[in-house]
Image: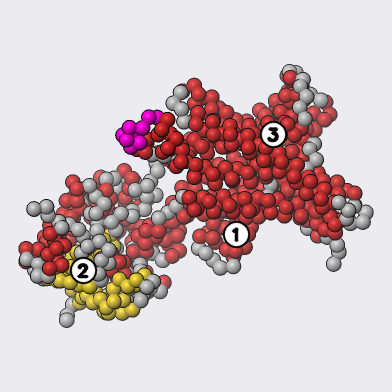
Amino acid sequence: MENVLLSVRHLRKAFGEHAIFEDFNLDVHKGEVVVIIGPSGCGKSTLLRCLNGLEPIQGGEILLDGEKVLRDNTSITKMRQKIGMVFQSYELFPHKTILKNILLAPMKVQKRPRAEVEAEALKLLQKVGLADRKDDYPRQLSGGQKQRVAIVRALCMHPEILLLDEITAALDPEMVREVLDVVLSLARAGSTMVIVTHEMNFARAIADRILFIENGKVVEQSDNPKAFFAHPVTARARDFLKSFDYE
Amino acid sequence: MDFAVMKAYLPRYWEALLLTLKIGWQGVLLALALGIACAVVVHLKIPVLRRIVGAYIALFRNTPLLVQLFFLYFALPKIGIRISAEVVGSLGLGLLGGAYMAETFRSGLENIAPIQTESAQSLGMNPVQVFGYVILPQAVTSSVPGLLANLIFLLKETSVFSTISLMDLMFTAKDLIGMYAKTIECLTLLVIFYLVMLLPVSILGSWLERRLRYAEFGN
Amino acid sequence: MPSLGIEVLFKGTNFLRLLGGLWVAVRISLISVAISIVLGIAVGMLMTAKRKLLKAVFRIYLEIVRIMPQMVLLFVVYFGTTRVFGWNLNAETAAILVFSFWGTTEMGDLVRGALQSIPAIQHESAQALGMNPLQVYVSVILPQTVRRIIPLSINLITRMVKTTSLVVMIGIVEVLKVAQQIIEANRRVAPNAAFGVFAVVFLLYFLICWPISRLAGYLEKRWS
């Protein structure tokens, strides 16, 4: 199929004897937003970590733009520049200001000129409503603000694809919205994303495609999230979705 | 107490303080350099070297400085290695301090969550960049309280220099007591001079520690 | 290869004398540690008290001990107080006094740290179960602190052993002094004895302190 950006073929991932994925396949198209849901421990986060080489894989291959993601030193740093990742726990660098957090990698890794990156960083900070906090340290920000900075930091590298790993799971409920709004606007602007989340309403709103994973297997997937959430086909998905309401 | 005597002794104490500071300063610098180098070796698990560093740390953390100095000063010349007392002082202090600093830096490095490394890697940094821009600066900052404690510990340890006939504060006090038997005056000056040397370091240390704790980055 | 002089230690009772010297230092350490642990627990508990005056007093005590070299304290007590108060203090008693004075603050600080590291919510949840303050202390707080304190107090032993080597400076005949005597006595037959003998002293200290540090490290890891 055309314009496949990221492709996972026959992925095998195991921790020792315990296999998480046996033969996992996934194609993500350019501009597509894939949302992965499933019970805790089903391997969603592990999958994202495999995609940018944070986890070694035991078989199969991962291709970005037809190029293999390999864990050897020189090629992986190049690949990771094209794959942005945002973590549940933000992982800003606590010893650097907000602006310096954002500038560090574009300047040191991509060797881009400061003026250019800084102008871009400020524009993006403006967009997420945090331009006035650029000289603060991460500890001075709320969780929601930190997470928005983490997204900007990833964006400034001009990644071809963004991986979002439960980015609202550590946030107070009233801060979830401000972060998800940022992600929604990215989706509308055509960013390619793979999102792992427990926010079902958000998943329904943003997904081009929903993947329901259990025990390392895709149990159900759908190109029509509204239909999926309203009438899941498989019993497993139905049970899983039921666990989110109290009626 | 005879203040006139104390005043007369002042220049000798002053000289001794300067000598102590000079040797102490050199020793501390050596300790810092050795400590960082050893901590990095242990942290990066460099084969062979890490065993040697481990043995060095164990050896120097588990023996008294006094015994280390005796060995450097009296024993080494017997196998043809002659070092001046001043160098033995700095070297001994540096070797002892290096072992302590290494442990402090190492625990500083260990305190940084592995996911910080992953976050830096995700931005495309290579291992050297991850270490230099993200891990090391955080490790150094989180080691500051430990480093200050080591600094005070090392400056206190300089009091054994007199045993290898360096004319430090202890030596001077002992010497003057032996000559003129003005025990109280000499000991009072000794205490005052150690206070002069260490109180500022201690106050500066607590101030710095408070500031750091206030500025503590932590998420 | 020239002799390195270790053989002088096998002459007569030389090695036993060396060990005897070591025991003098170790004995002083053990007595001081025992005193320090008992007093330190009391001091540590008092340091967590909220009384302002008490806090200030301990603060000063801690600060003095923190910045005064043990050797200076040793001199002040052994040479100074005997002068001022005119009493008779033998060197070993002076050493035990000084090292206990020092060790008590160290131990006290460890105990204070351990007690304060128990989150307040532990007190509250115990109180919420209807326990009185004594019950809270005995059945909830102390058991949690003991595990933190044991490895640290074992470590105090090695620090004490290392520090007591200083007693040679107030004329106590301990291992370094005996070593010097042996070297002196054999200066003709074994001119290089300083190397062998001091190397052995170095090693002896290591053999005492290292296993104790290892034990402390092991317990710390296991109980953390």
Front residue of this view, candidates C30 and A196: C30
Nearest to the eye among marks 1 and 2: give it: 2
Q: Which mark is residue A213?
A: 2
Please report the residue visible at 32 percent of the width from the left and 51 percent of the height from the top. A99
Measured along the vertical axis of the image, is residue A71 above or below residue C218? below
Q: CA distance from mark 1 to mark 2?
A: 47 Å
Quarter of the figure that contains the N terminus of chain A: bottom left
Q: Is residue B165 above or below residue A203?
A: above
Q: Give the structural element (helix, strand or loop) at label 2.
A: strand
Residue type (three-letter) at the residue carrying disc 1? Gly
Q: Nearer the viewer, residue C35 or B4?
A: C35
Q: In the shown orientation, is residue B44 left or right of residue B15?
A: left
Q: Position of residue A241 (x, y in %)?
A: 13, 61
Across and down, in percent, residue A235 comes to: 12, 68
Magenta span covers which residues? C124-133
Q: Could you say which quadrant of the image residue A242 lies in?
A: bottom left
Where is residue B74 shown, x and y percent of the image? 80, 51
Side (left or right) of C22 relative to A198: right
Chief secondary structure of the magenta portion: helix
Q: Amino acid at mark 2?
A: Ile
Q: Residue furthest bottom?
A: A1
Q: Which mark is residue B54?
A: 1
Residue occupying the point 62% across, 63% down: B52
* SS category of the residue bearing label 1: helix
In this orientation, does residue C69 appear? no
**Residue where numbered disc 3 is placed:** C96
- Mark 3 chain: C
Side of B89 relative to A43 (left or right): right
Kindly report the distance in space between the C-alpha atoms of the residues bearing marks 3 and 2.
69 Å
Q: Is residue B201 left or right of residue A247?
A: right
Label 3 crowd (10 A; few <14 / some 14-19 / many >=20): many
Q: Circle 1 marks a residue in which chain?
A: B
